[in-house]
Image (cartoon, rainbow, N blue to C red):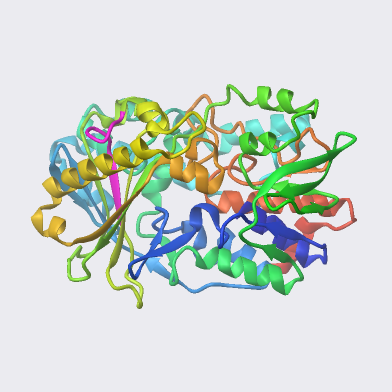
């Protein structure tokens, strides 16, 4: 979506834009696909930023398009050490208090802290200025503002989630329940956000693919050109300046500016081997920590199976919240299972089980040194699928097991191959306390080569990735005397 976003903003101002996409459809991590009459998304259950007045519909409106959405007001159900805890989207605190009558003080403290963090996070509607554009005075002012206006956020929000949880309660079950909405090492505010939007998000009526599809429509309407099934194999350099790209079929395309939506790792590999800056660029990011990938098990569940109003299930132990995710295996990893709204033409119900097994698991999933998927890889996929299905069936029961019509697993290797996101990362760079906020800028050290997506400011998430295209387009249009920020504000005033 970063490339589609940048392309839409530029095409709206009559710039000649070509988007090259290696797949038959665009969208990256918000791509949808069908299997045996059921449409699947890649694990995003809904988006708060898709609500009316939020970032994504505003971007779409500015480009000249829109999509139909529906509210996702489902409840959640968490199994901790096999015991079930149900939480209704409109009575989360009350359900916690009822489940843990001996921990009322801790629960009240957690919800008080979370509500303050949430309020401080959502305060201010203006688009943030990238830190790399701030001068020293602005940086100092920004820091003072955060400490005075967002004290709870600064005290708790930027610490590691498991560290904050241990401060707020000694009950490992409660800690595990809070962690169940993340399953990854993150700063605490990420867990707060996930809990704060339960039952408040929106979902495209036609699935997540509706967002990139609508973006393509507006892009083409404004004169943009999209080439599908075309893979870039080299970034062309002349006199140390990016001048174009070469594709797998040997064709070359030239432009003033080259924008890559792939991770910087893959982008830099596309530079010519004799380009003197290539090794330096790769060296600069060699030690930057990457947010983990996940596995996604796509399940087609018989339409007669009744999930009631539960849209998400979690399965974990009371120690998972403090476990090292690098130690997770199919036997001990936490699992999040998302139940999607059934679309009118779906033959069954789409369900996706997400679980964090590392990219490096069993020699990078028993692939070859070049990450080729050999026979051992497919055998391992089948074994992992069987183990996860067995674990789900033990908790959900035989009725659930008998309702499974299809099961297809995507591994971190799959996500890396499909998205060109290093190690199949879901969120770009790591977002634990020592790494959060260290976003790259869109402009690279190669003149006229730029980056968009989850690896650059303002970072991860569909809204963040889409906004990365806005920030880049704003800078590129500035050189032509166009004030995109002013136009965007005036458009909605």
The answer to whether residue 298 is left or right of residue 457 is left
Res 283 quadrant in image: top right
Asked if residue 304 is among those painted magenta in the image, a careful observer would answer no
User: Taken as a whole, is the magenta stretch helix, strand or loop?
Assistant: loop
Residue, far bottom:
344
Asked if residue 329 is among those painted magenta in the image, a careful observer would answer yes
Res 57 quadrant in image: bottom right
Residue 220: image x %, image y %? 70, 71
The answer to whether residue 2 is left or right of residue 41 is right
Which quadrant of the figure contains the N terminus? bottom right
Residue 320: image x %, image y %? 27, 31
Which quadrant of the figure contains the C terminus? bottom right
Residue 44: image x %, image y %? 42, 54
Residue 409: image x %, image y %? 34, 48
The answer to whether residue 25 is left or right of residue 113 is right
Residue drawn at point x = 36 percent, y = 39 percent = 375
What range is drawn magenta here? 328-338
Q: Is residue 6 visible from the viewing direction of this image?
A: yes
């Amino acid at each position: 979506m970063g490339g589609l976003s940048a392309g839409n903003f530029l095409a709206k101002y009559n710039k000649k834009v070509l988007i090259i996409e290696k797949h038959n459809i665009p969208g990256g991590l918000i791509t949808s696909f069908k299997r045996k009459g059921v449409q699947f998304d890649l694990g995003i259950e809904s988006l708060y930023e898709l609500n009316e007045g939020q970032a994504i519909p505003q971007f779409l409106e500015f480009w000249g398009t829109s999509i139909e959405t529906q509210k996702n007001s489902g409840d959640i159900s968490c199994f901790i050490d096999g015991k079930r805890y149900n939480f209704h989207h409109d009575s989360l605190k009350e359900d916690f208090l009822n489940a843990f009558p001996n921990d009322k003080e801790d629960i009240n403290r957690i919800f008080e802290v979370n509500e303050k963090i949430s309020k401080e996070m959502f305060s201010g509607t203006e688009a943030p200025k990238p830190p790399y554009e701030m001068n020293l005075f602005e940086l100092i002012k920004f820091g003072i503002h955060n400490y005075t206006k967002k004290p709870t956020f600064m005290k708790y929000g930027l610490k590691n989630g498991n560290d904050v949880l241990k401060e707020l309660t000694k009950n490992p079950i409660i800690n595990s329940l809070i962690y169940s909405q993340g399953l990854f090492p993150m700063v605490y505010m990420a867990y707060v956000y996930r809990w704060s939007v339960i039952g408040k998000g929106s979902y495209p009526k036609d699935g997540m693919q509706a967002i990139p599809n609508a973006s393509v429509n507006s892009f083409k309407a404004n004169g943009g050109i999209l080439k599908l099934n075309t893979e870039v194999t080299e970034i062309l350099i002349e006199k140390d300046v990016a001048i174009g790209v070469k594709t797998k079929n040997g064709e070359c395309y030239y432009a003033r500016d080259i924008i890559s939506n792939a991770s910087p790792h893959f982008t830099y590999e596309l530079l010519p081997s004799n380009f003197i800056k290539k090794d330096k660029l790769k060296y600069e990011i060699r030690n930057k920590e990457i947010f983990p990938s996940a596995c996604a098990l796509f399940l087609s569940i018989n339409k007669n199976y009744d999930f009631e109003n539960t849209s998400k299930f979690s399965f974990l132990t009371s120690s998972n919240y403090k476990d090292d995710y690098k130690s997770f295996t199919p036997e001990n990893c936490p699992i999040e299972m998302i139940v999607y709204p059934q679309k009118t033409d779906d033959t069954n119900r789409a369900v996706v089980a997400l679980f964090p097994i590392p990219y490096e698991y069993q020699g990078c999933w028993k692939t070859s040194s070049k990450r080729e998927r050999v026979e051992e890889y497919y055998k391992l996929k089948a074994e992992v699928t069987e183990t996860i299905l067995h674990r789900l069936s033990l908790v959900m029961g035989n009725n659930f097991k008998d309702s499974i019509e299809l099961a297809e697993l995507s591994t971190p290797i799959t996500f890396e191959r499909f998205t060109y996101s290093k190690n199949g990362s879901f969120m770009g760079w790591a977002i634990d306390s020592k790494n959060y906020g260290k976003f790259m800028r869109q402009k690279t050290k190669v003149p006229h080569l730029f980056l968009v997506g989850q690896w650059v400011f303002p970072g991860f998430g569909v809204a963040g990735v889409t906004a990365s295209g806005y920030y880049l387009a704003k800078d590129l249009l500035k050189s032509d005397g166009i004030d995109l920020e002013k136009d965007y504000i005036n458009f909605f005033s």
